[in-house]
Image: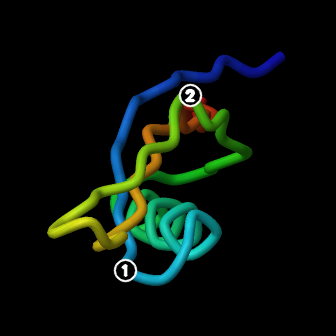
Amino acid sequence: MSVARVTEISATSPESFDEAVKAGIERANKTLRNVEGCWIKDMNVQVENGAVKGYRVNMAVTFVLDD
C-alpha cells in the first residue's frame, strides 16, 4: 500500500502553457521524490501593453511518500 501527498505550485513560461507545465514538473522533481502526476487547476495568460507576455499554470503535484 502506498500513501501520496499533493502540493500546489505555480509555474510560468514566456512560450506556452505546455512549457510552463514542463518547467513546473522539472522544478518539482528537484525537491520531491516519486512524482507521479499533476492536475492543472488553472491556466492564465499574463498581458502587458495588449500583448501576451507569459503563460502561467497552477498545478497540484502528486508524489508518493517513502515508506
Q: Nearer the viewer, residue 54 or 6?
A: 54
Q: Nearer the viewer, residue 42 or 61?
A: 42
Q: Nearer the viewer, residue 62 or 20?
A: 20
Q: Is residue 18 left or right of residue 9?
A: right
Instruction: Estimate the x, y position of residue 4 in percent, counting from the top left.
Output: 63, 22
Q: Residue at x 72, y 45 (%)?
A: 36
Instruction: Estimate the x, y position of residue 15 in percent, counting from the top left.
Output: 48, 83
Instruction: Estimate the x, y position of residue 8 in percent, counting from the top left.
Output: 39, 31
Q: Quadrant of the N terminus?
A: top right
User: Which image quadrant is residue 44 in?
Assistant: top left
User: Which image quadrant is residue 39 in?
Assistant: top right
Circle 1 — which element? loop
Report the colour scheme.
rainbow
Q: Residue at x 55, y 74 (%)?
A: 16
Question: What is the distance, in whole Å, between disc 1 and disc 2 at their CAs?
Answer: 19 Å
Instruction: Give the amino acid type for the residue marked by disc 2 in the picture.
Output: Lys
Instruction: Estimate the x, y position of residue 45 in percent, counting from the top left.
Output: 40, 54
Q: Is residue 26 left or right of residue 62?
A: left
Q: Residue at x 37, y 80 (%)?
A: 14
Question: Which residue is label 2 attached to?
Answer: 41
Q: Nearer the viewer, residue 56 or 9?
A: 56
Instruction: Give the amino acid type for the residue marked by disc 1 in the picture.
Output: Pro
The residue most toward the right is 1
Q: Residues within 10 Å of mark 1 (few under 14, many from 20)?
A: some
Q: Residues within 10 Å of mark 2 (few under 14, many from 20)?
A: few
Q: Nearer the viewer, mark 1 or mark 2?
A: 1
The residue most toward the left is 49
Question: Which residue is label 1 attached to?
Answer: 14
Q: Residue at x 56, y 28 (%)?
A: 41
Q: Is residue 18 left or right of residue 14?
A: right
